[in-house]
Image (cartoon, rainbow, N blue to C red):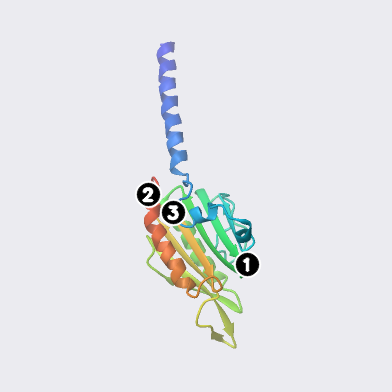
């Protein structure tokens, strides 16, 4: 009887261990998965190194690329993996890419809705945030930061973000006016590409 119990325990332990490995694998973002990642990781010579800089981080505590209220962010929102890539040039200009995987589609949707609520709650003063719904994955939005002068809004945004969610993944793309003449088109296009790509990851689009 004792021997049978020991065997059963070993079997259960093996199953649970296998599940843990599968869960860990499912929540991992593979190397070079993000759209700009290969370029960000590529070796650069000295001349290039003083003209532009890349930073790659997998910290779960990183602030979203779009953080209207600028407050402290919690990592207790169900996120299980996160990768942030920022690109700064000597122009100066800035663009970025961020992918966050959540434990479920429900948790990812809550994060998306929370971010949308922040845009409305903390719009800014002279530089105001304006959001509009766009078709990106299951849900998405474009956010522009516009300069206002005497009550009139500039035609083009100073900075642009595209935020999308598909299944259990949330992704953000950002660019400023100094980086490209049409940052809105750029970030929205990138977000739509990632909306398709994230389904390559296990359990994200199930």
1 and 3 marks in contact (CB < 8 Å): no
Vertical order, 63 against 23 (above or below): below
Q: Nearer the viewer, residue 40 or 72?
A: 40
Residue that label 2 marks: 200
Label 3 residue SS: strand
Residue that label 1 marks: 90
- In 3D space, how far apart are the residues under numbered discs 2 and 1 (Cα atoms)? 35 Å
Q: In this rendering, which labeled residue sits more in front, label 1 or label 3?
A: 1
Q: In this rendering, which labeled residue sits more in front, label 2 or label 3?
A: 2
Label 1 residue SS: loop
Residue that label 3 marks: 169
Point out the tag, 1 or 3, that comes first from the N-terminus.
1
Q: Quadrant location of residue 192?
A: bottom left
User: Taking 31 as reference, is 59 left or right?
Assistant: right
| Residue pictured at 43% horizontal, 42% vertical | 26
Point out the tag, 2 or 1, that comes first from the N-terminus.
1
Image location of residue 203, percent across then percent down: 38, 46
Image location of residue 52, percent across then percent down: 60, 62
- In 3D space, how far apart are the residues under numbered discs 2 and 3 (Cα atoms)? 11 Å
- In 3D space, how far apart are the residues under numbered discs 1 and 3 (Cα atoms)? 32 Å
């Amino acid at each position: 009887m004792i021997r049978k119990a020991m065997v059963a325990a070993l079997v259960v332990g093996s199953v649970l261990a296998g599940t843990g490995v599968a869960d860990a694998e499912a929540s991992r973002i593979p190397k070079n998965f993000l759209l700009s990642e290969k370029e960000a990781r590529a070796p650069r010579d000295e001349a290039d190194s003083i003209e532009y800089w890349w930073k790659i981080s997998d910290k779960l505590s990183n602030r979203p690329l779009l953080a209207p209220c600028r407050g402290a962010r919690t990592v207790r929102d169900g996120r299980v993996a996160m990768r942030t890539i920022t690109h700064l040039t000597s122009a100066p200009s800035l663009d970025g890419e961020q992918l966050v995987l959540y434990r479920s589609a429900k948790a990812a949707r809550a994060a998306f809705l929370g971010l949308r609520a922040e845009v409305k709650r903390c719009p800014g003063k002279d530089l105001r945030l304006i959001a509009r719904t766009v078709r990106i994955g299951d849900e998405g939005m474009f956010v522009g930061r516009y300069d206002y002068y005497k009550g009139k809004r500039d035609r083009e945004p100073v900075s642009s973000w595209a935020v999308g969610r598909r299944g259990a993944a949330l992704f953000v793309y950002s660019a400023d006016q100094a980086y490209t003449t049409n940052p809105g088109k750029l970030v929205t296009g990138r977000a739509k590409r990632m909306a398709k790509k994230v389904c390559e990851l296990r359990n994200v689009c199930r």
